[in-house]
């Protein structure tokens, strides 16, 4: 065991401070009012953000006082405490913007889902760093999935789908720690089928899947017509079932058939039966997406997805937010209109311009150059976090580091994508930039725990 302690990573801290400063300026510009110019005026968003910046600086310093063994020893306790907070929010939380994910605490509101991110990273790091954990073991895979899934389900129950989706990013941590790449391929296939199911009719998709299946069988096995017909019959059955059966009944029948074929594939160890089973499960997934989209999702969720996929064009209605966002970013040109000179921002044309659409303020007032600078800072930060994670001497610290970069990357990609129309508007903040005390505090804790772990990477080896 080494007793050497190193300085905190000043490059990461410097980038963090730059991002927080840019974020404050963006919030100030988005919410600026000539009648209230003082940055500490707490009646305005920028005044409250100014207070939160001060609180975050204090919390960051406090974290550096802790011994890193605190985080390894109490990771599950912290995780459990945040789960209780999520449950308490379900019962005692206040509903804001359709989501019951806030707890009113005097002069501010606390969003419990933000704190679930770093607590889940800690719990996952503790579990995966255990020498007995093996991600090739199905039991351990289920435990890891449960650690991620429990807070996800609680947050979904609060009605905050955007924050819940963020936890999907932690599959990258599992992959780094030995989870089969097949799971990532399944995830990519799920995304492709999800988009396809919303753009094309069900029989068309099943026709493509069936064609791919039959061509694969012919090329690999050289089957004759009689054998091909044996595998074609289930596909024809899927067509007929989708036409004549009710959606829910069809899903149940298809599910039973898929389970039977799964057992057959396991018992016979047949490559061809396995392919057919995969086709059946893909069919269930596609039909399930269609059913959930039309019968479970709320109308505004369907509309947002439709706008991104191009199936809905309504720039004055459901597509208003996205359209105004593009106008604001595009109007900035190369160098921008100048600080506090954004006409789209001043005219309040962009909804949620200090929170979900804060990037519009940067794009309009600082232009393409300012936008690229901000994006570059995030890329440097994420690459630096990966470098920190890889140089750790303990498994716990490395795994936690990958959890940090996964969550920041997901927020960065989705938030940027929302503002330019690459992904649906799901309402998640841009780390360190968007207005919001809970978000800024939670991301500060998330990052500075890693900075603390890194500074003592040679002190305690685990």
Image (cartoon, helix red, strand yellow):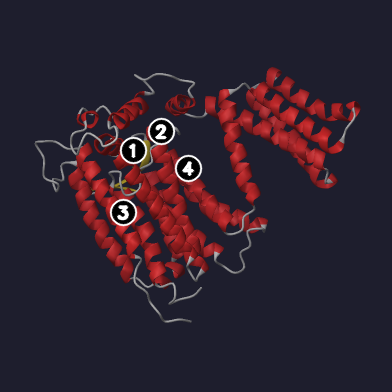
Q: Nearer the viewer, residue 247 or 238?
A: 238
Q: Which residue is mark 1?
A: 356
Q: CA distance from mark 2 to mark 3?
A: 23 Å
Q: Does label 1 or label 2 sit earlier along the sequence?
A: 1
Residue 232: image location, x then y, percent: 81, 27
Classify mark 3: residues with Cα within 10 Å, few (<14), some (14-19) or many (20+).
many
Q: CA distance from mark 1 to mark 2?
A: 9 Å
**Is label 1 in contact with label 2 (beta carbons under 8 Å)?**
yes
Q: Which residue is mark 3?
A: 441
Q: State which quadrant residue 100 falls in.
A: top left
Residue 135: image location, x then y, percent: 63, 58
Residue 74: image location, x then y, percent: 44, 67
In the picture as drawn, the residue positioned furthest to the front comes out as 334
Q: CA distance from mark 4 to mark 1?
A: 15 Å
Classify mark 4: residues with Cα within 10 Å, few (<14), some (14-19) or many (20+).
some
Q: Does label 2 or label 3 sit earlier along the sequence?
A: 2
Which residue is rendered at x = 25% and y = 59% of the image?
A: 57
Q: Is residue 318 above or below residue 114?
A: above
Q: Which residue is mark 2?
A: 425
Q: Which residue is mark 4?
A: 165
Q: CA distance from mark 3 to mark 1?
A: 17 Å
Q: CA distance from mark 4 to mark 2?
A: 12 Å
């Amino acid at each position: 065991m080494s007793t050497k302690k190193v300085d905190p990573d000043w490059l990461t801290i410097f980038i963090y401070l730059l991002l927080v400063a840019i974020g404050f300026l963006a919030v100030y510009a988005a919410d600026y009012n000539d009648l209230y110019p003082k940055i500490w005026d707490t009646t305005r968003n920028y005044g409250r953000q100014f207070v939160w910046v001060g609180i975050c600086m204090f919390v960051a310093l406090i974290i550096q006082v802790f011994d890193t063994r605190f985080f390894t020893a109490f990771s599950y306790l912290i995780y459990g405490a945040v789960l209780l907070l999520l449950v308490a929010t379900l019962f005692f939380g206040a509903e804001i913007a359709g989501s019951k994910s806030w707890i009113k605490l005097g002069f501010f509101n606390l969003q419990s889902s933000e704190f679930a991110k770093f607590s889940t990273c800690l719990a996952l790091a503790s579990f995966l760093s255990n020498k007995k954990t093996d991600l090739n073991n199905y039991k351990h895979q289920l435990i890891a999935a449960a650690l991620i899934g429990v807070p996800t389900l609680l947050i979904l129950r609060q009605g905050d789908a955007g924050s819940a989706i963020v936890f999907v990013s932690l599959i990258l941590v599992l992959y780094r720690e030995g989870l089969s790449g097949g799971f990532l391929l399944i995830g990519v296939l799920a995304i492709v089928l999800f988009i396809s199911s919303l753009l094309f009719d069900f029989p068309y998709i099943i026709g493509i899947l069936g064609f791919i299946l039959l061509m694969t069988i012919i090329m690999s096995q050289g089957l004759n017509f009689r054998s091909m017909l044996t595998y074609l019959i289930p596909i024809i059955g899927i067509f007929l079932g989708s036409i004549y059966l009710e959606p829910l009944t069809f899903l149940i029948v298809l599910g039973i058939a898929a389970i039977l074929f799964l057992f057959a594939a396991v018992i016979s160890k047949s490559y061809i039966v396995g392919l057919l089973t995969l086709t059946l499960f893909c069919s269930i997934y596609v039909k399930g997406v269609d059913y959930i989209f039309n019968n479970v999702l709320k109308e505004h969720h369907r509309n947002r997805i439709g706008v991104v996929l191009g199936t809905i064009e309504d720039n004055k209605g459901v597509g208003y937010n996205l359209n105004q966002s593009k106008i604001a970013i595009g109007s900035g040109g190369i160098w921008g209109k100048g600080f506090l000179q954004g006409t789209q921002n001043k005219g309040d044309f962009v909804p949620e311009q200090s929170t979900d659409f804060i990037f519009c303020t940067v794009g309009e007032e600082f232009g393409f150059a300012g936008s690229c600078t901000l994006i570059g800072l995030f890329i440097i930060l994420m690459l630096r976090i990966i470098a920190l994670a890889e140089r750790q001497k303990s498994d716990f610290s490395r795994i936690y580091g990958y959890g940090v970069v996964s969550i920041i990357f997901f927020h960065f990609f989705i938030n940027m994508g929302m503002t330019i129309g690459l992904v649906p508007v799901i309402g998640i903040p841009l780390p360190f930039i968007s207005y919001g005390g809970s978000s800024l505090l939670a991301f500060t804790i998330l990052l500075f725990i890693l900075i603390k772990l890194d500074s003592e990477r040679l002190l305690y080896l685990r």
